[in-house]
Image (cartoon, rainbow, N blue to C red):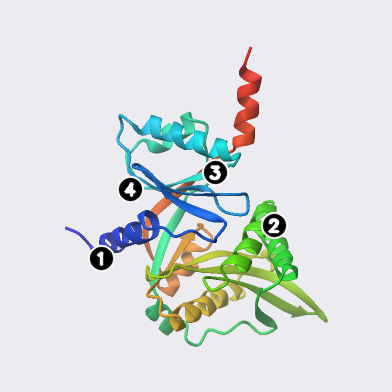
Amino acid sequence: METDHDKLLALLDARMRRGAQSESVSARIEHTPHVVRQSGSDKVWNGILWSDLESGTADAVIAEQIRHYAGLGQDFEWTLYAHDRPADLGGRLVAAGFTPEESETLLVASVADLVRRTSETDAPAGIELREVTDEAGVAQVVAVHEQAFGTDGTRLGRRISAQLQESPETFRVHLAVAHHDGREIPVSSARLELYPGTGFAGLWGGGTLAEWRGRGVYRALVSHRARIAAELGYEYLRVDASDQSRPILERLGFAALTTMTPYQYQYQYQAQAQARSRP
Protein backbone atom coordinates (compact mmCIF):
# COMPACT_ATOMS: atom_id res chain seq x y z
CA MET A 1 0.00 0.00 0.00
CA GLU A 2 1.45 3.34 -1.05
CA THR A 3 2.02 5.76 1.83
CA ASP A 4 2.20 9.54 1.90
CA HIS A 5 5.98 9.20 2.16
CA ASP A 6 6.02 7.04 -0.98
CA LYS A 7 3.97 9.63 -2.86
CA LEU A 8 6.22 12.46 -1.71
CA LEU A 9 9.36 10.54 -2.69
CA ALA A 10 7.87 9.81 -6.12
CA LEU A 11 7.02 13.51 -6.49
CA LEU A 12 10.55 14.52 -5.57
CA ASP A 13 12.01 11.98 -7.99
CA ALA A 14 9.85 13.32 -10.79
CA ARG A 15 10.38 17.02 -10.16
CA MET A 16 13.83 17.28 -8.62
CA ARG A 17 15.71 14.42 -10.24
CA ARG A 18 14.18 13.46 -13.59
CA GLY A 19 12.95 17.03 -14.02
CA ALA A 20 16.07 18.68 -12.59
CA GLN A 21 16.90 22.29 -13.42
CA SER A 22 20.43 23.61 -13.91
CA GLU A 23 21.84 25.49 -10.93
CA SER A 24 23.08 28.41 -13.06
CA VAL A 25 23.65 29.45 -16.66
CA SER A 26 27.13 27.91 -16.42
CA ALA A 27 25.57 24.48 -15.99
CA ARG A 28 23.50 22.35 -18.33
CA ILE A 29 21.11 19.52 -17.58
CA GLU A 30 21.44 16.59 -19.96
CA HIS A 31 18.89 13.80 -20.39
CA THR A 32 20.20 10.50 -21.73
CA PRO A 33 18.21 7.26 -22.04
CA HIS A 34 19.48 6.09 -18.64
CA VAL A 35 20.58 9.10 -16.56
CA VAL A 36 19.93 12.77 -15.92
CA ARG A 37 23.14 14.66 -15.25
CA GLN A 38 24.47 18.16 -14.76
CA SER A 39 27.63 19.19 -16.57
CA GLY A 40 29.75 22.29 -16.75
CA SER A 41 32.98 23.84 -15.58
CA ASP A 42 34.45 23.58 -12.09
CA LYS A 43 32.21 26.51 -11.12
CA VAL A 44 29.23 24.12 -10.98
CA TRP A 45 28.37 20.78 -9.41
CA ASN A 46 29.01 18.02 -11.93
CA GLY A 47 27.21 14.76 -11.47
CA ILE A 48 24.43 12.23 -11.91
CA LEU A 49 21.10 13.35 -10.50
CA TRP A 50 18.92 10.41 -11.52
CA SER A 51 19.42 6.99 -13.03
CA ASP A 52 17.26 4.02 -14.02
CA LEU A 53 19.54 1.11 -14.81
CA GLU A 54 19.23 -2.60 -15.44
CA SER A 55 21.76 -5.16 -14.26
CA GLY A 56 22.72 -6.13 -17.78
CA THR A 57 23.56 -2.61 -18.94
CA ALA A 58 24.52 -0.74 -15.75
CA ASP A 59 28.29 -1.17 -16.11
CA ALA A 60 28.23 0.16 -19.66
CA VAL A 61 26.22 3.21 -18.59
CA ILE A 62 28.63 3.88 -15.73
CA ALA A 63 31.56 3.70 -18.14
CA GLU A 64 29.76 6.08 -20.49
CA GLN A 65 29.42 8.68 -17.70
CA ILE A 66 33.10 8.38 -16.81
CA ARG A 67 34.02 9.02 -20.45
CA HIS A 68 31.66 12.00 -20.58
CA TYR A 69 33.16 13.78 -17.60
CA ALA A 70 36.70 12.78 -18.55
CA GLY A 71 36.07 14.60 -21.81
CA LEU A 72 35.26 17.69 -19.76
CA GLY A 73 38.25 17.13 -17.47
CA GLN A 74 35.92 17.22 -14.46
CA ASP A 75 35.56 15.24 -11.28
CA PHE A 76 31.93 14.29 -10.71
CA GLU A 77 29.50 12.78 -8.24
CA TRP A 78 26.97 10.01 -8.67
CA THR A 79 24.26 10.63 -6.08
CA LEU A 80 22.86 7.20 -5.27
CA TYR A 81 19.47 6.99 -3.55
CA ALA A 82 18.57 3.84 -1.59
CA HIS A 83 15.73 2.96 -3.99
CA ASP A 84 17.78 3.35 -7.19
CA ARG A 85 18.23 0.30 -9.38
CA PRO A 86 19.92 -2.13 -9.61
CA ALA A 87 20.29 -2.98 -5.94
CA ASP A 88 24.05 -3.51 -6.30
CA LEU A 89 24.69 -0.18 -8.05
CA GLY A 90 26.87 1.07 -5.19
CA GLY A 91 29.20 -1.90 -5.55
CA ARG A 92 29.37 -1.40 -9.30
CA LEU A 93 30.33 2.25 -8.81
CA VAL A 94 33.13 1.31 -6.42
CA ALA A 95 34.39 -1.28 -8.90
CA ALA A 96 34.47 1.45 -11.57
CA GLY A 97 36.68 3.69 -9.42
CA PHE A 98 34.19 5.74 -7.40
CA THR A 99 34.69 6.48 -3.71
CA PRO A 100 31.62 6.54 -1.45
CA GLU A 101 31.21 9.31 1.11
CA GLU A 102 29.10 9.17 4.27
CA SER A 103 25.44 8.49 3.62
CA GLU A 104 22.90 11.23 4.27
CA THR A 105 19.18 11.16 4.98
CA LEU A 106 16.79 12.89 2.62
CA LEU A 107 14.36 14.87 4.77
CA VAL A 108 11.31 16.81 3.58
CA ALA A 109 8.96 19.17 5.41
CA SER A 110 5.88 21.16 4.53
CA VAL A 111 6.92 24.81 4.36
CA ALA A 112 3.64 25.97 5.90
CA ASP A 113 3.94 23.51 8.80
CA LEU A 114 7.55 24.41 9.38
CA VAL A 115 6.81 28.12 9.49
CA ARG A 116 4.07 27.49 12.05
CA ARG A 117 6.39 25.39 14.19
CA THR A 118 9.17 28.01 14.11
CA SER A 119 7.06 31.17 14.04
CA GLU A 120 8.66 32.44 17.25
CA THR A 121 12.21 31.31 16.45
CA ASP A 122 14.59 34.24 16.26
CA ALA A 123 18.36 34.39 16.13
CA PRO A 124 19.94 33.88 19.57
CA ALA A 125 21.03 36.96 21.49
CA GLY A 126 24.20 38.42 20.01
CA ILE A 127 23.70 36.66 16.65
CA GLU A 128 22.85 38.56 13.46
CA LEU A 129 21.66 36.84 10.28
CA ARG A 130 22.98 38.45 7.10
CA GLU A 131 22.42 37.77 3.44
CA VAL A 132 25.61 37.34 1.42
CA THR A 133 25.76 39.41 -1.75
CA ASP A 134 29.46 40.04 -2.48
CA GLU A 135 32.83 38.31 -2.65
CA ALA A 136 33.78 39.37 0.86
CA GLY A 137 30.72 37.52 2.15
CA VAL A 138 31.53 34.49 0.00
CA ALA A 139 35.02 34.39 1.52
CA GLN A 140 33.46 34.35 4.99
CA VAL A 141 31.14 31.51 3.99
CA VAL A 142 34.11 29.50 2.71
CA ALA A 143 36.03 30.13 5.92
CA VAL A 144 33.08 28.95 8.03
CA HIS A 145 32.65 25.87 5.84
CA GLU A 146 36.31 24.90 6.16
CA GLN A 147 36.31 25.32 9.93
CA ALA A 148 32.94 23.59 10.45
CA PHE A 149 33.47 20.62 8.15
CA GLY A 150 37.26 20.38 7.98
CA THR A 151 37.28 20.24 4.18
CA ASP A 152 38.64 22.54 1.50
CA GLY A 153 36.06 25.11 0.38
CA THR A 154 37.75 26.44 -2.76
CA ARG A 155 35.40 24.79 -5.23
CA LEU A 156 32.38 25.64 -3.05
CA GLY A 157 33.42 29.29 -3.14
CA ARG A 158 33.57 29.25 -6.94
CA ARG A 159 30.11 27.66 -7.11
CA ILE A 160 28.57 30.16 -4.71
CA SER A 161 30.08 33.12 -6.58
CA ALA A 162 28.80 31.81 -9.92
CA GLN A 163 25.28 31.19 -8.60
CA LEU A 164 25.06 34.59 -6.92
CA GLN A 165 26.09 36.27 -10.15
CA GLU A 166 24.09 34.16 -12.58
CA SER A 167 21.00 33.03 -10.64
CA PRO A 168 20.35 35.51 -7.81
CA GLU A 169 16.59 35.00 -8.12
CA THR A 170 16.85 31.32 -7.16
CA PHE A 171 19.84 31.30 -4.82
CA ARG A 172 20.32 32.85 -1.38
CA VAL A 173 23.25 32.60 1.01
CA HIS A 174 23.13 33.56 4.68
CA LEU A 175 25.70 34.05 7.42
CA ALA A 176 25.16 34.00 11.15
CA VAL A 177 27.52 36.57 12.65
CA ALA A 178 28.23 36.69 16.38
CA HIS A 179 28.88 40.04 18.06
CA HIS A 180 31.33 38.90 20.73
CA ASP A 181 33.89 40.85 22.78
CA GLY A 182 33.61 43.81 20.44
CA ARG A 183 34.24 41.65 17.38
CA GLU A 184 32.14 40.27 14.54
CA ILE A 185 32.69 36.53 14.12
CA PRO A 186 31.04 34.53 11.29
CA VAL A 187 29.91 31.38 13.09
CA SER A 188 27.54 29.63 10.67
CA SER A 189 26.51 29.71 7.02
CA ALA A 190 23.66 28.22 5.03
CA ARG A 191 22.21 28.31 1.54
CA LEU A 192 18.70 28.28 0.10
CA GLU A 193 18.12 27.05 -3.45
CA LEU A 194 14.78 27.61 -5.13
CA TYR A 195 13.51 25.38 -7.92
CA PRO A 196 10.76 27.25 -9.78
CA GLY A 197 7.81 25.19 -10.91
CA THR A 198 8.64 22.21 -8.69
CA GLY A 199 7.14 23.31 -5.38
CA PHE A 200 10.46 22.41 -3.72
CA ALA A 201 13.20 24.53 -2.21
CA GLY A 202 16.43 23.10 -0.83
CA LEU A 203 18.36 23.82 2.33
CA TRP A 204 22.11 23.35 1.93
CA GLY A 205 25.16 23.97 4.06
CA GLY A 206 24.20 24.76 7.62
CA GLY A 207 27.75 24.43 8.95
CA THR A 208 28.32 25.93 12.41
CA LEU A 209 31.64 26.37 14.20
CA ALA A 210 32.02 23.76 16.94
CA GLU A 211 32.16 26.22 19.82
CA TRP A 212 28.89 27.86 18.68
CA ARG A 213 26.83 24.68 18.34
CA GLY A 214 23.98 23.94 20.68
CA ARG A 215 22.92 27.61 20.94
CA GLY A 216 20.07 27.65 18.40
CA VAL A 217 22.05 29.16 15.51
CA TYR A 218 21.32 26.32 13.08
CA ARG A 219 17.63 26.27 14.04
CA ALA A 220 17.42 30.04 13.44
CA LEU A 221 18.92 29.67 9.96
CA VAL A 222 16.43 26.91 9.12
CA SER A 223 13.52 29.06 10.30
CA HIS A 224 14.79 32.10 8.41
CA ARG A 225 15.06 30.22 5.13
CA ALA A 226 11.67 28.56 5.64
CA ARG A 227 10.04 31.98 5.95
CA ILE A 228 11.67 33.11 2.70
CA ALA A 229 10.44 29.96 0.92
CA ALA A 230 6.93 30.54 2.29
CA GLU A 231 6.89 34.15 1.10
CA LEU A 232 7.85 32.95 -2.39
CA GLY A 233 5.08 30.33 -2.48
CA TYR A 234 7.07 27.10 -2.11
CA GLU A 235 5.32 24.04 -0.68
CA TYR A 236 8.18 21.78 0.45
CA LEU A 237 11.70 22.06 1.83
CA ARG A 238 14.25 19.30 1.29
CA VAL A 239 17.47 18.70 3.17
CA ASP A 240 20.23 16.13 2.68
CA ALA A 241 20.96 15.72 6.38
CA SER A 242 23.98 14.41 8.22
CA ASP A 243 23.57 12.40 11.40
CA GLN A 244 24.40 15.58 13.30
CA SER A 245 21.67 17.76 11.82
CA ARG A 246 18.99 15.10 11.35
CA PRO A 247 17.73 15.08 15.00
CA ILE A 248 17.35 18.87 14.99
CA LEU A 249 15.43 18.82 11.72
CA GLU A 250 13.16 15.97 12.80
CA ARG A 251 12.26 17.88 15.94
CA LEU A 252 11.22 20.75 13.68
CA GLY A 253 8.90 18.47 11.69
CA PHE A 254 11.04 17.13 8.84
CA ALA A 255 10.33 13.52 7.83
CA ALA A 256 12.86 11.03 6.49
CA LEU A 257 12.06 9.73 2.99
CA THR A 258 15.16 7.74 2.10
CA THR A 259 18.92 7.67 2.37
CA MET A 260 21.42 8.77 -0.23
CA THR A 261 25.15 8.26 -0.70
CA PRO A 262 27.44 10.50 -2.76
CA TYR A 263 29.93 8.51 -4.84
CA GLN A 264 32.85 10.63 -6.01
CA TYR A 265 34.87 10.05 -9.16
CA GLN A 266 38.14 11.98 -9.15
CA TYR A 267 39.16 12.35 -12.77
CA GLN A 268 42.73 13.50 -12.13
CA TYR A 269 43.37 10.81 -9.52
CA GLN A 270 42.02 8.04 -11.75
CA ALA A 271 43.99 9.30 -14.75
CA GLN A 272 47.21 9.23 -12.70
CA ALA A 273 46.41 5.75 -11.33
CA GLN A 274 45.81 4.43 -14.84
CA ALA A 275 49.07 5.98 -16.07
CA ARG A 276 50.99 4.30 -13.22
CA SER A 277 49.44 0.92 -14.05
CA ARG A 278 50.58 0.97 -17.68
CA PRO A 279 53.70 -1.09 -18.45
Residue linked to disc 2: 146
Residue flagged by tag 3: what amino acid is it? Phe
Residue flagged by tag 1: what amino acid is it? Asp
Residue flagged by tag 4: what amino acid is it? His
Marks 2/1 in contact by CB < 8 Å: the verdict is: no
Kindly report the distance in space between the C-alpha atoms of the residues bearing marks 2 and 3.
20 Å
Marks 2/3 in contact by CB < 8 Å: the verdict is: no
147 shown above or below 169: above
Q: Residue at x 73, y 62 (%)?
A: 143
Mark 1 residue element: helix
Kindly report the distance in space between the C-alpha atoms of the residues bearing marks 4 and 3.
21 Å
Question: Is residue 123 toward the left or the right of residue 11 in the image?
Answer: right
Residue linked to disc 1: 4
Residue linked to disc 4: 83
Quadrant placement of the N terminus: bottom left
180 shown above or below 63: below
**Residue 69: % across, % down:** 53, 39
Residue linked to disc 3: 76
Mark 3 surroundings: few (<14), some (14-19) or many (≥20) residues within 10 A: many
**Residue 183: % across, % down:** 81, 78
Question: Is residue 108 toward the left or the right of residue 273 in the image?
Answer: left
Q: Nearer the viewer, residue 51 or 32?
A: 32
Question: Is residue 152 toward the left or the right of residue 116 in the image?
Answer: right
Kindly report the distance in space between the C-alpha atoms of the residues bearing marks 3 and 1.
33 Å
Which residue is at the far bottom? 120
